[in-house]
Amino acid sequence: MGIGGGSDMYRQQILDHYKNPRNYGELDAPTFSHTGENPSCGDTLTVDVGLADDGETIESVAFSGDGCAISQASASMLSERLPGMTLDELDAMDTDDITEMLGVDISPMRIKCAVLARQVAQDGAKLYEGDVDDLDVTKTEGDEV
Amino acid sequence: MGSSQQEQYPLDVDAVREEFPILDRKVGGDVTTPGEDENDTKPLVYLDNAATSQTPDRVIDAIADYYRSYNANVHRGIHHLSQEASVAYENAHDRVAEFVGADGREEVVFTKNATEAENLVAYAWGLNELEPGDNVVMTQMEHHASLVTWQQTAKKTGAEARYIRVDDDGRLDMDHARELIDDDTRMVSAVHVSNTLGTVNPVSELVDLAHDHGAYAFLDGAQSVPHMPVDVGELDADFYAFSGHKMCGPTGIGVLYGKEHVLEEMEPYLYGGSMIRRVSFDDSEWEDLPWKFEAGTPVIAQGVGLHAAIDYLDDLGMENVHAHESLLAEYAYDRLTEFDDVEVYGPPGDDRAGLVSFNLDGVHAHDLSSILNDHAVAVRAGDHCTQPLHDELGVAASTRASFYLYNTREEVDQLVDAIDDARQLFA
Ligand SMILES: Cc1ncc(COP(=O)(O)O)c(C=O)c1O
């Protein structure tokens, strides 16, 4: 299948997660929390992560935000996918992992919506681990098209 | 077309469309290989004309003919081809001047696009002339091409950037304009037709206000010259900018119109070959207008293409083009406002240019345009390079359908049907 996007982009699963987001809200005591946005689309996301006592295994995830179906459904699915994974495994997730998780072809112009949640979670983890310290809000690149 | 309702439409759209083979193509397959292939199965409905228009065969032919039979650099060789190319390139300036009511080629500078035309004046005039205490007045509905350019020029020079308010109907608050434009105003930069709201602004009034206070007036005509008769002399604007690719011409060419005496006084913006008359190790003298502002090898093929595009538009008649689009926009406005869950921005249907921006309740503009794309309906989603205006509207993005001389009521109906599909999907 090509990467045209096509009607498949809004398969039932995506619409279901968009209309009934899982883990929507905030964690009571997140280990870390981070916010990101797509400035040109107005998608915003905050991802809360709670780690297990080992300090590296993700135990709980919540997200909140606003935006297009692709960005919000992707966050909802990721919030189900992450618990049980380590921070290293999170860090290793790439765009292919996200399109595979979504189970649909994402058109090139919409990729930044799809990867926003992953990027926010990864940047949040990096800030928590002290790998970066100068990041305020994650912004996926891509100007108005 | 063809039913009785269509009779008021002045253009024979079937005939028009024959010159635009791209409008017959199908889309929907893989986008990594350009052009139609067997996976492209859905007939295109092209409603993104405010972003760029399609190119009729005769314009493509004119450009191909240039490359096939008289391609040469201009103003440099005394050989035959160079002379043919030079004459054609100069004639293109004359043709543009005639089309928009300029006094002659001296007032017509070819640039890369409308954006570069804005920047040319910002660099050549703004950076040299603006100072603390001065102000530049824009509108809240400026395209980034003008807004960012003058905002940044103001920042660099210590001048103040001011924005005329847009009211709830998407019209300029002219009382506010009269408040903002004062004796410290040096430049009024205003969009003639809003690419987001479809508002046709009272630009003559703005030009007069600017002149009453000794300021220049710069009008952004990117959405007006392609769609309606424009006479820059009558408007009395000091500067006027537009782009070839939105008016059936090629990409890579824009036009800066400037009054001759104003351009005369301005320093060049780009230095190099072609823009000089004499060069020594110590200093240089500038070429006459408009060449003073066209450094380096200019946009020759694009100039030839723009000339052909203007001939084409004149053949159809700009009054007819305008009437055709206005009827389509009014029809689209009426159909879209039938629905309670569709919010349409800008003035009423009978008082707008040929585009409609809107939002469908509960569906993000990017989702909506993706679903419209599933129906092969090409629209624009986002902020249309008017981000501050969208902030004012209180939305991050909108969807815009924009019409041109080859669009039909059937295509508007297809748009409305596709919106209904999105409504069902997200219900
Ligand atoms: C009102 C307006 N001004 C300026 C521009 C800039 O045109 P260009 O991108 O060709 O420079 C556009 C279109 O993009 C426009 O709609």
Image (spheres, coloured by chain):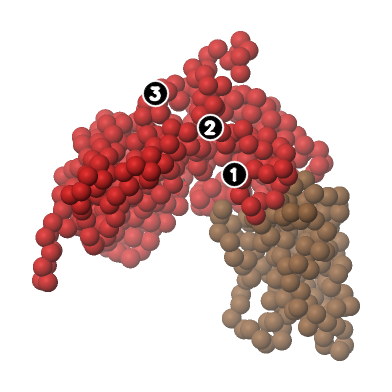
Write down the colour of chain B. red
Residue at mark 1 to residue at mark 2: CA–CA distance:
20 Å
Residue A85 percent coordinates (x, y): 85, 78
Instruction: Kindly identify which numbered label has been placed on residue B380.
Output: 1
> Which element type, helix, strand or loop, lies under badge 3?
helix
Contact (Cβ within 8 Å) of mark 3 with mark 2: no
Residue B302 percent coordinates (x, y): 37, 45
The residue positioned 67% from the left and 38% from the top of the image is B26
- Dot 3 crowding, Cα within 10 Å, few <14, some 14–19, many 20+: few
Between tags 1 and 2, which lies in front?
Answer: 2
Front position in the image: B105 or A81: B105
Write down the colour of chain A. brown
The chain under label 3 reads B
The residue positioned 77% from the left and 45% from the top of the image is A7
Front position in the image: B390 or B177: B390
> Which element type, helix, strand or loop, lies under badge 2?
loop
Contact (Cβ within 8 Å) of mark 1 with mark 3: no
Point out the image quarter for the N terminus of chain B: top right
Residue B349 percent coordinates (x, y): 55, 26
Q: Which residue does the numbered mark 2 point to in the structure image?
A: B20
Q: Is residue B89 visible?
A: yes
- Quarter where residue B122 is shown: bottom left
- Dot 1 crowding, Cα within 10 Å, few <14, some 14–19, many 20+: many
The residue positioned 25% from the left and 37% from the top of the image is B91
Q: Is residue B247 visible?
A: no
